[in-house]
Every structure is written in structure tokens, then in C-alpha cells.
Amino acid sequence: MAPIRVAIAGSTGSIGGQTLEIISADPDAFDVVGLSTGRSAAVIIEQAKNFRPAIVAVADPSARNEVSEALSGLSEIEVVADAKEMCDIADVVINGVVGFAGLPVTMATLSNGRRLGLANKESLIAAGPVVQPLREVDGAELVPVDSEHCALHQCLRSSIDANREVSRLVLTASGGPFRGRSAAELANVTVDEALRHPTWSMGPKITIDSSTLMNKGLEVIEAHELFGTPFDEIDVVVHPQSVVHSMVEFLDGSTIAQLSMPDMRLPIGYALGWPHRLGTPFGTIDWTQLSQLNFEPPDRSTFKCLDLAYAAGRAGGTAPAVISAANEIAVDAFINGEITWAQIHDVSAAVLDATTVSQPSTVDEVIDADRRAREDARRVISGMLA
């Protein structure tokens, strides 16, 4: 069998690095044909020398010049500016780009009728109305890489007719580093504290989102977009061990869950191998060591971003794009010491409250909604600093 041709958008990030680990564990099964980064020149140069892709995309002009010079002796590698150029030469594209910047890769992969391993939830959340039609392109497949949505995807494989038999989807949340703490106790938490996730090793933006439960709220919107499940049939439960990654409850009362130890290489490998499973195990459970699994409801009064995301999802249209964009700006402001942890919610809520929601029909309309939300978020933050 010919190796699976893989392109990785955001190859220098956490998801990209772990994807390359999986490929290195079974090099005969995969052929890396594309790598991309924003500006991490040194890392992608090393990756390119190791995996020899046909295309290396570097968005930042200065970094691109550095990469071009370093790889000039490797004639088989073309250095380009746009990651979309690698989306039509791969069998599967792993989109590990952080934030709304991942939308072009999502659109290009599906438009070219390729399989998309989606770790970039923001592009589907923000642009759901314009991404959904592309899932109907011949050959296009969308396999979620988020551990929770991958778990749901696996659980739904067991259903004869998922649209008719499912009662609800249950997304699990670790609770992040601040589980069990009150709003008063979180008034002065630091960035370092927010980045100390108890079970997962992730990038800074998604780790902060986990601490506020905005990540889980965005995942609720993503689950709605991925599986077409109404918001009233999508629940969240806190599960601190992060072993049960999500569950599907069926009409007859049965619940099917996907369990594994926390390891993002499992959902990445699932997307790489779909519809088959890889032979290399990741996240295997030692049942002699796993003593308990705990579950509790989320504290919605302290972690208000969860219900804010639900509200944006139910509003539909451009509202998810607005909340995703405003949250990105707010998280950056928190990391930069401009606002407090609690004000991440306040900024996002203020922007959503002031937004007139519309129904986008083009990518440009989504991009415009994203741009305006970012501008509004910066104005709100400026007012807080005044």
C-alpha cells in the first residue's frame, strides 16, 4: 500500500510536533509532503531537513527568506508563502494552526476534496455557515483532532443511525488548573498559574481557554457544527482525570464513552489513519493503576465563559465568530498583563452584547465579523486600562 501523503499546517506547534512523532514511529506508512509555520524558522528548517517535504510554507517574509536560504541546497523542497498550496498534494491535512488564522487551510483542504484532521476549532466555529457546504465536496472528509470530538466521533461509529438514536452528547472537561476555586480566589491569579494545566500539555492560548472553560464552550459550538446536534442536547461534565474524553447517550439509556490516558497523539493518529486505526498505541490505560473516575457539574457562576459560548452558539450566524475573535484578543491581553483573568470573560461578553448578529454567506463576511470583533475587543480593553 502506498504511504499516506500528509501535510501539516502549524507543524512547529504542539499538534504539528506530535503529528511528526506519530509519523516517525511508522515512517513507511506516511509521506510528509507539506509543512507550514508562521515565523518559527529554525524549527521548520530542522523539520524540513528531516522529512524532506515537497512544500514548506512560511507566512512571515523575513522568516521565509531565512528558510529559503537554509534549504537552498535541497532542490526537491519549494519554499512558499501560503500554506494553502500544500492542501491539494496531500491525502490528509492536519490543521494545527492556532486561532482564526487556520480558516484558509480548512477551506482549501475541503475544497480540494481532501481529508482534514481538524485541531483548529476556531475556523469551524467562526465560519461554520461557509465551511459546512464544503463538507459535501466529493472526497472531502472532516475528522476532528480535539480529544473530546474525536471521542464523540468514535462513539458515534457504534450507532446504526446516529441522527435517530442519539439522546445527547456529553463533553468532558478537566476543569483546568482552577477547578474548585471560587471567583474571589481567582481575582488575582497570574498567567503562570493559568498555564499550569493538571493533565494536558498544550499551547498557551488553549491552556488559558481551558482555565476559563471558554475552550469547553467553543467545543460545544464545534460539536454542534460537526454532528448537527442541537445545543440543548449537548452537555458538559467536569472529569478531572481526563481519561473519559467524551460520551454519547442513546435513546434507550445506554452511554458509550471513549477512554484513554491523556495523549493528543491518539486523536491525531485517528485522523491520520481514518477510517482505519493505527497500529501504534498511544494513551493505553493500565487498569491496575486507574483507581477512580470522578464527575461533577461545572461551576457556571465562576467559569462564566462556558455559558457565554453557549449563548453565542444559540445566536448562530456571526456570533460564534465574534466570541472566538474577542476571546483571542482578551487572552492575549491577559498574557501580556493588560487585564485580569476574570476580565477575559468581561471583554468577550461586552463585545458579544454590542454586536448585531448577521447570517454570513461568504468567507469575506466572516472575516469582516472577526475583524470588527477584534477591534471592539481592543476598544473594550483600552477602556479598562484608562
Image: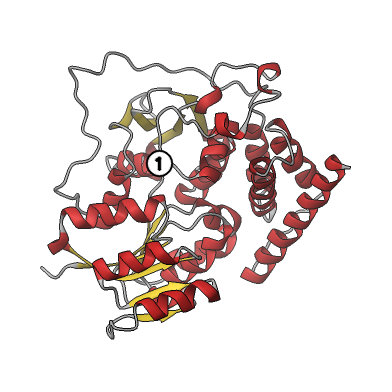
Q: Quadrant of residue 45?
A: bottom left
Residue extending furthest toward the bottom: 75
Residue 343 in view (yes/no): yes
Task: Rate crowding at label 1 as few (under 14), some (14 to 19) or many (20 or more) other CA atoms within 10 Å.
Answer: few
Residue 22 screen position, x and y as percent? 24, 52
Residue 289 screen position, x and y as percent? 22, 17
69 versus 299 height, above or below: below
Residue 111 in view (yes/no): no
For image coordinates 78% across by 51% down, the residue present is 378
Q: Is residue 130 left or right of residue 141?
A: right
Q: Is residue 150 left or right of residue 375?
A: left
Q: Check disc 1 and report the residue beneath it.
A: 164
For image coordinates 12% across by 63% down, the residue present is 28
Q: How many marks?
A: 1
148 versus 25 height, above or below: above
Q: Quadrant of residue 274?
A: bottom left
Residue extending furthest toward the left: 1
Residue 348 screen position, x and y as percent? 72, 42
Name the kind of residue labelled 1 in the image. Answer: Arg
What is the basis of the colouring in this image? secondary structure
Residue extending furthest toward the top: 291
126 versus 69 height, above or below: above
Residue 17 screen position, x and y as percent? 34, 54
The answer to which of 241 and 315 lies nearer the viewer is 241
Viewport quadrant of the C terminus: top right
For image coordinates 56% across by 29% down, the residue present is 193
For image coordinates 68% across by 37% down, the residue present is 308
